[in-house]
Image (cartoon, grey):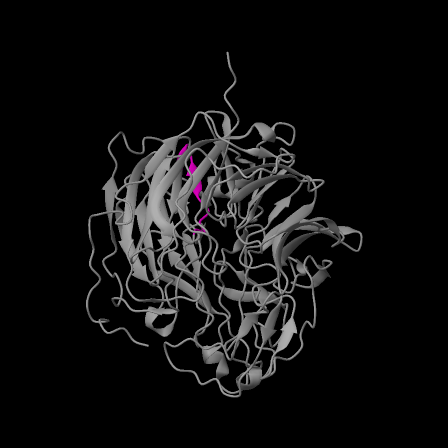
Amino acid sequence: MKSDNMKKPASIRMNALKAGASVAVLLLSLGHSASAATEKKISGPRRVEQTHPAVPSPQRKGAAGAETGGKTVVAPGPGVTASVNVTGAMLSGAESDGANWLVSGRNYDNTRFSPLKEITAQNVNHLKMVAIAQTGYTASFESTPLVVNGVMYLTTPVVNSKQALIAMNAATGRTLWTYTYDDGQNEICCGPVNRGAAISAGALYLLTLDDHLVAVDAKTGKQKWITKVADARAGYSETMAPTIYKNMVIVGSSGGEWPIRGFIAAYDTGSGKRLWRFNTTDRHGTWSGDSWKQGGGMPWTTPTVDPKRGLLIFSTGNPNPDLNGSVRLGKNLYTDSIVALHITTGKLAWYYQEVPHDVWDYDAVSNVVLFHADDHGKMVAAAGEAGKTAWFYIVNRKTGKLIRKSAAFDQQKNMFAQPTPKGVQMLPGANGGSEWSPPAYSPLTHDVYVLGMNQLMTFTNEKSSPAIPGQIRLGSTFKNVPHGLQNGTLTAIDVNSGKIAWNDTFPQPMIGGALATAGNLVFTGEGDGWFDAFNAKSGKRLWRFNLGAGVNAPPIAYSVGGREYIAVAAGGNFQLSYPYGDALAIFALPKAKH
């Protein structure tokens, strides 16, 4: 469906937040939490707003695109005074830099492991919420904030055709500036989300839902440049957090439910000029006819970087149409795969396909994580991805050869049965297994911590799935079975054996992300508002706090002035209809009394 006003330019307005003209900040001297032994549901002193705005349809009308970009509003006060000039050496050394969170996955390995250990399994029951920043953007929040020398950068979802990048004090949540972008036409399957920004050399880089890459000055919030990366009218959207390597800002594409071709591309950080582009559907023999031209394979989530081997490693999504394989016979490379490119050229290095010729929407959508693992008695550089199939796949980072699949971390029933017109019930459902939720890996336990879900679904197919430009094409349906199994899991998987170290079950499907720390802790959130801390070795829940809206974004850890903080966005989830909110919550241990 084409927009009625496609030719009208998107308007740019100075008002930063129509949903809330400024970010409301509440500083808290006391928070309310619950230890593992306390089951009474307790909210914070100010609950996150729980509203349920109208869910946008998969095809939303809008302007053709905001070619001129956005506007910046600077909050009263001193603004950004800290040094926010992130160098290449800082990005390469992010693994050992506990104070900052410089990359979406905390480091190039995407481990989401913090070396901080002020907050531990022994004292986490004293953790308090010290601030909450209410952004005014009440919608599905999936953003991972960045932190640079006490300054936090948070992206928001799209609300009323606007999305924002907010700079705030990482200890208090006070807004320093807000950059607001007016989105044009966009086509979305899974919510008006944004998963975060990237930072390098004094500039921030964010993607917009209407397919633009924007560079913003990290100190002032002023736009530096903007470039278009794809055509929203065809079904492309941009939701991932980019990543930076040397002079390249690397982005991928979303929109695998539309008949389009996925890609990953590198742009010059200084000018926005495209340097290379890799298309994720292979045109040589694994697709029938010219079905590769509209074959999907979207890299939904932020890639990893292996500087030593010069590799960019990422996962790819489903082929299109999702459930009807009759129009795309063959293995459908490089969909549902872990893919490695030579990072300087964008040329293919290797791939491992998890699900050949997928007709179940079992795409590889969670972030790839890098670590070392045992391979027949020898420790090797490895890469892992938590599949929708409920297996964690571990491959050799040099060759792409499969080392092992883990034991199943969620239930499996009738897996790989062919969908029929009448319908067949299967587990995992189309959401997984593991959805986009980034896992965390601890080098102390050698476990990877994976969010999962059990959703019993009925899969059907259809005889014909014509490709109509700009229109969604699933190839049939997958639906939850009424009164069928619906729950979630958090699983610790030993990467050296593939065995389950522990598995915790939750009353709702789990989606959002995990954080592991050197304090022997794993943090994650739940759709009913709980934010939880677990013992990383045993899986015992040690602490929880209810934020009133779904905690379905990845948490982070950082320090300011030597004090460790944990932060997480609570905005609910579009896909699973978890209650919406607009907040970023910040936690810390009480200050020592002198």
Does the segment drawn in magenta span residue 305? no
Q: How many marks do you count on the picture?
A: 0
Say if 327 sits above or below 506 in the image.
below
Q: Position of residue 131 (x, y in %)?
A: 42, 32
Q: Quadrant of residue 119?
A: top right
Q: Which residues are magenta?
A: 141-151
Q: Position of residue 21 (x, y in %)?
A: 25, 43
Residue at 71% x, 40% y is: 537
Where does the N terminus fall, quadrant-wise? Answer: bottom left
Query: Which of these two is toward me, 455 or 520?
Result: 455
Give the quarter of the image for residue 431: bottom right
Q: Position of residue 314 (x, y in %)?
A: 54, 60
Q: Report the residue at 50% width, 11% height from top.
A: 594
| Camera-nearest residue between 37 and 354 | 37
Residue 576 seen by the camera: yes
Q: Quadrant of residue 176?
A: top left
Question: Where is 518 relative to 328, above or below?
Answer: above
Asked whether the viewer can see residue 200, the reply is no
Q: Main secondary structure of the magenta part?
A: loop
> Where residue 424 appears, x then y in whole percent?
63, 77
Question: In the image, is residue 149 part of the stretch drawn in magenta?
Answer: yes
Say above or below: 87 vs 486: above
Residue at the extreme top of the image, as rendered: 594
Q: Nearer the viewer, residue 22 or 71?
A: 22
* Image side of residue 193 versus residue 589, left or right: left
Position above or below: 127 against 379? above
- The residue lying at 43 percent from left, 74 percent from top is 258
